[in-house]
Amino acid sequence: MHADLEMAFDKVVDILQKDLRCKGGWHYGSIGRGMSDIYSDYDPVFLVADIDFEEFALDVPGILRQACDDLLIFWGECFNDSHFKNYCSVMKINDKLHQFDFFILNSDYPEEWMCKQHLKDCTRENIIFDRTGEVGELLDKGYRTDNNIPDVVRAMDTYWLHTEMLIKYFKRNDIFKLIKNFDMIFHAHIDLLLGQYDTLDWGAWESKVKYCVPEEKQAHLLQYFCAADLDSMAAAMKRCLPLFLEDMKDACQAKGIEYPERIAKEIMDYFHRMLP
């Protein structure tokens, strides 16, 4: 953690400890998991009662401005609602820019999904401060969300469907449709791998790939990235098809699923015939 950001965080906490609307808070993210480094930002979650929730949220940018030289960006997540909010910010301190995320959890609705997600695996060791004792009591309840493991069969069907769909966009020279379908195919390959390897109880797909998927399988995913032109994209797909086939066989064997060899062969053969 950068020293300037530590200073800003301490200022925010000092302000909130004097704000009777804030019951306390705890560390989420890399700090809460003991995985922070010099590039990490803060992900504190602060507990506020329903009666004060919306008013407190409106005051957050003013709180952050008091902790830095300049608040450049204050950006609310699209999932923000009356139960849980996150505001991402970019602040300038001295000559450097830092990110500071600010989560607010409505203490009257702890069983809402986003609230439980940001309580998952947090204990009293994560507490920043606890004015009323309610933070500790809430963390002791052990709220959590289920880890959503992707469906391997759906991942395979999605992959082959969009691979066949690519052909007409190659023929039309429709680059943006190709990019869209490349993204679908890429994420279907990710889902296939996570359906087999995901053991991580936190994080989005990129963290799960990094920490769960073997490095040789991670390398397969990198083969999709290429220049946005027909030849480069066609070459990338011809590299990736046998890699997906390999990973599909492994996943089916690991999950006890019948390997759909006929589907894979028909679509791969047709792809190569149409795009020699």
Image (tube, grey):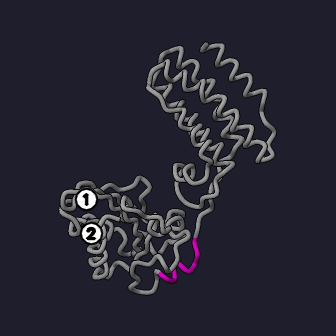
Q: Earlier in the sequence, mark 1 or mark 2?
A: 2
Residue found at the far bottom of this picture = 132
Task: Please tell me whether the stretch drawn in magenta is mainly helix, strand or loop.
Answer: helix
Residue stretch rendered in magenta on the structure: 136-143
Identify the secondary structure beneath mark 1: strand
Q: Is residue 107 visible?
A: yes
x, y percent for residue 59: 27, 68
Q: Quadrant of the C terminus?
A: top right
Q: Quadrant of residue 74?
A: bottom left
Q: Is residue 166 above or below residue 108?
A: above
Left or right? Give the position of 6 relative to 124: left
Q: Is residue 137 above or below residue 275?
A: below
10 Å neighbourhood of mark 2: few (<14), some, or many (≥20)? many
Q: Amino acid at mark 1?
A: Met
The one nearer the camera, 99 or 219, is 219
Left or right? Give the position of 40 relative to 256: left
| Circle 1/circle 2 CB separation < 8 Å | yes
Residue 91: assigned label: 1
Q: Residue drawn 56% across and 36% down? A: 186
Q: Quadrant of the N terminus?
A: bottom left
User: Does residue 242 belong to the magenta stretch?
Assistant: no
User: Does residue 138 belong to the magenta stretch?
Assistant: yes
Q: Quadrant of residue 79?
A: bottom left
Left or right? Give the position of 255 relative to 23: right
x, y percent for residue 35: 47, 64
Q: Is residue 162 visible?
A: no
Q: Residue drawn 53% across and 66% down? A: 112
Q: CA distance from mark 1 to mark 2?
A: 9 Å
Identify the secondary structure beneath mark 2: helix
Residue at the disc numbered 2? 8
x, y percent for residue 13: 31, 76
